[in-house]
Image (cartoon, rainbow, N blue to C red):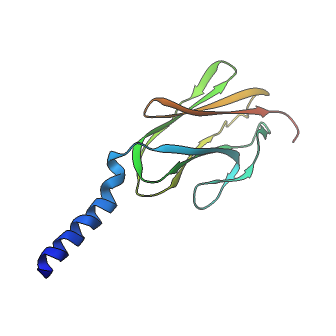
Amino acid sequence: MSKLHSFAALLLLLCLIRCGSGRTLTVTSIQLGRSLNSDKTVGGFTTTFAPDDTVYLSVLTGAAGSGTIRVRWKYGDRVIDEPKKQVSYNMAAATDFRLQSPGGFPRGDYTAEVFVNDQPAGTRDFHVEIAR
């Protein structure tokens, strides 16, 4: 009987480890700022950036799940980048993205549109100006 219990415990452990791979991610928050913390959440929240700043975005997801997270970075109506990451998490997590411009960003209004498995999950607007 102890072998049966050991086997059942092993199956339960494997399920807990792998259960996230079959569930869709749920976005709980989208953060925007100038820096990243070690857990991939954003530090220094802001929606106003200088032309030479790096723009950091973190997509926070609750519970286990897997899927593709994509960010469509836009300047006005023009798409300037559209990175994506395939992720699988066993618990709540943060997925980070960054937008950089070696020559500096032009002043103006920008948008970051977040998608999970090609479904809209949220939008964050931000602005680039000369002085902070």
Q: Nearer the viewer, residue 91 or 38?
A: 91
Question: In the image shown, does 4 or 78 lie closer to the viewer?
Answer: 4
Q: Is residue 132 above or below residue 37?
A: above
Give the image location of residue 50, x and y in percent: 80, 39
Instruction: Give the image location of residue 53, x and y in percent.
Output: 74, 43
Q: Position of residue 33 (x, y in %)?
A: 71, 46
For the point 86% across and 35% down, which residue is it?
130
The residue that appears at 60% across and 26% down in the rendered structure is 80
Which corner quadrant holds the N terminus? bottom left
Q: How many marks?
A: 0
108 with respect to 59 (left or right):
right
- Residue 41 percent location from the top left of the image: 62, 54
Q: Residue at x 51, y 54 (%)?
A: 93
Please tell me in which quadrant of the rendered image residue 123 appears.
top right
Give me the residue at 87% from left, 42% from top: 132
**Residue farthest to the right, as pictured:** 131
Observer-nearest of 125 and 80: 125
